[in-house]
């Protein structure tokens, strides 16, 4: 392709992006966002589209959707590629994706709304006679250390076991519902360490946090998050994903596995509180902006609560409570499932962004890192943002 042909193609791509502009400062209303037209020049948009195109080609990505907000305003949206390769349906910024473990910040915020209301304590025990869930799951007496687990241990992935390695309980027998899966795990899987001493990423721990929310609120996990987190953030269309292609939600993308992975043979509904939500990038940006600790958008948690939520745990200097964190003051979370790679970021300099794809390559850590770097690289193309 000649330089001029490539530039013409990029202009076409950039012109087709949903890069329109208005303030998110009143995003509690859920009004459609739009964008200031002077935020990004055509040349900068072309450069951003080129970076995205390289990422998509490298990892054989059918569809990529991105949203970026800066200081309380949506400043960039784009949807590139296909929602459905077979039908030729082009991806739009309104298409929903499975967000995988980007769900965990949502669950953490829901837990902290209950802590803020005095209905939960981080130090509160989870299982056993003195626990929030009591003896509802499994067969007491429980295995060693189980009754020592607290809410904070689950939030920080320091419960002492049940990690996301080869034996991750959440990817076992998909015919088991949440209750039977939790009971089986308590009865058959011992903890490896005393809670609070060892960090090991646990999808199962966040599944249990969903059941804690239900026990305290007497609502389903989905209902409580929608009522107490999403609605106050101006988000209306997020929902828990279905498992099969036939259970695909309206306006949801098709997922494409690579290297033999099947996106439609998992119990995603069972993953609700650790990896089950559907969202658009703008939905995630709205959510992040309402818990970012800045004053440009009303936060649904107090500053003290946000500080607690994003303070690193003792066992891992780079993980807080449902969020990865670093010494630069950035917070984020990634997500990965067969057919899905996702990220949501809040930067210390006032940005919130999210990027979602409908595939996952192997090894998955390569596409995860590349997706993270992608949005940073795209944002650096806008000179006056100063990234």
Image (cartoon, rainbow, N blue to C red):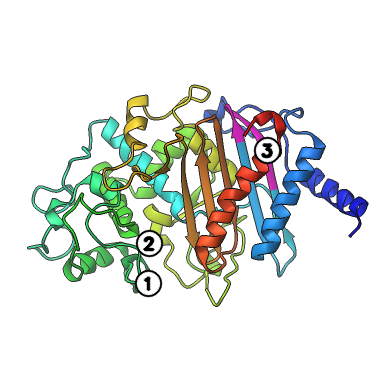
Disc 2 target residue: 270
Residue 181 counted in the magenta span: no
Q: Which mark is residue 105?
A: none
Question: 236 or 21, which is in the foreground?
Answer: 21
As helix, strand or loop, the secondary structure at mark 1 comes to: loop
Q: Is residue 273 left or right of residue 134?
A: right
Q: Quadrant of residue 228?
A: top left
Identity of the residue drawn at 22% across and 57% down: 160
Disc 1 target residue: 174
Q: Is residue 97 left or right of residue 324?
A: right
**Quadrant into which the N terminus falls:** bottom right
**Percent coordinates x, y for residue 251 in the rendering:** 62, 55
**Percent coordinates x, y for residue 355 in the rendering:** 59, 49
- Label whose residue precedes the other's in the sequence (1 or 2): 1
Task: Kindly report which numbered mark, 1 or 3, lies closer to the viewer in this rendering.
Answer: 3
Against 172, is 231 above or below?
above
Against 269, is 151 above or below?
above
**Percent coordinates x, y for residue 116 in the rendering:** 29, 31
Identity of the residue drawn at 47% across and 32% down: 290
Q: What residue span does the magenta drawing correspond to?
A: 69-78
Count neighbours of disc 2 (C-alpha within 10 A) and say few if under 14, some if 14 to 19, many if 20 or more: many
Disc 3 target residue: 76
Q: Are marks 1 and 3 in contact (CB under 8 Å)?
A: no
Q: Quadrant of residue 218?
A: top left
**Percent coordinates x, y for residue 271 in the rendering:** 39, 59
As helix, strand or loop, the secondary structure at mark 3 comes to: strand
Q: Are marks 1 and 2 in contact (CB under 8 Å)?
A: yes
Question: 197 or 220, which is in the foreground?
Answer: 197
Q: Is residue 17 left or right of residue 251?
A: right
- Label whose residue precedes the other's in the sequence (3 or 2): 3
Q: Cα distance, mark 3 to mark 2?
A: 33 Å
**Tally of marks:** 3
């Amino acid at each position: 392709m000649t330089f001029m042909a490539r530039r013409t193609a990029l202009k076409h791509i950039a012109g087709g992006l949903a890069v329109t502009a208005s303030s998110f400062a009143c995003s509690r209303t859920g009004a459609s966002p739009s964008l200031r037209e002077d935020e990004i020049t055509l040349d900068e948009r072309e450069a951003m589209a080129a970076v995205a195109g390289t990422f998509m080609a490298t990892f054989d990505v059918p569809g990529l959707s991105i949203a970026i907000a800066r200081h309380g305003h949506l400043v960039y949206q784009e949807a590139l590629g296909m929602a459905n390769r077979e039908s030729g349906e082009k991806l739009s910024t309104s298409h929903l994706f499975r967000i995988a473990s980007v769900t965990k910040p949502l669950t953490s915020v829901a837990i902290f709304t209950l802590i803020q209301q005095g209905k939960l304590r981080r130090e509160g025990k989870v299982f056993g006679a003195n626990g929030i869930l009591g003896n509802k799951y499994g067969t007491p007496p429980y295995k060693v250390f189980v009754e020592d687990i607290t809410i904070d241990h689950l939030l920080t992935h320091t419960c002492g076991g049940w990690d996301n390695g080869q034996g991750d309980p959440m990817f076992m027998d998909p015919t088991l519902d949440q209750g039977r899966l939790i009971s089986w795990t308590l009865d058959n899987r011992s903890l490896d360490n005393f809670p609070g001493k060892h960090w090991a990423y646990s999808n199962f721990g966040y599944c249990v946090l969903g059941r804690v929310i239900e026990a305290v609120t007497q609502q389903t996990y989905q209902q409580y998050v929608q009522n107490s987190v999403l609605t106050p953030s101006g988000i209306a269309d997020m929902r828990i994903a279905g498992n099969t292609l036939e259970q695909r939600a309206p306006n949801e993308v098709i997922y494409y596995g690579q290297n033999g992975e099947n996106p439609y043979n998992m119990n995603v509904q069972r993953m609700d509180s650790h990896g089950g939500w559907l969202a658009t990038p703008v939905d995630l940006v709205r959510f992040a902006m309402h818990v970012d600790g800045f004053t440009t958008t009303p936060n649904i948690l107090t500053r003290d609560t946000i500080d607690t939520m994003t303070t690193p745990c003792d066992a891992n200097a780079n993980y807080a409570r449902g969020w990865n964190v670093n010494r630069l003051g950035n917070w984020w979370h990634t997500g990965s499932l067969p057919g899905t790679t996702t990220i949501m970021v809040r930067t210390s300099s006032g940005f919130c962004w999210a990027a979602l794809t409908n595939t996952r390559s192997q090894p998955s850590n390569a596409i995860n890192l590349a997706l993270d770097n992608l949005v940073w690289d795209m944002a650096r193309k806008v000179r006056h943002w100063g990234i």
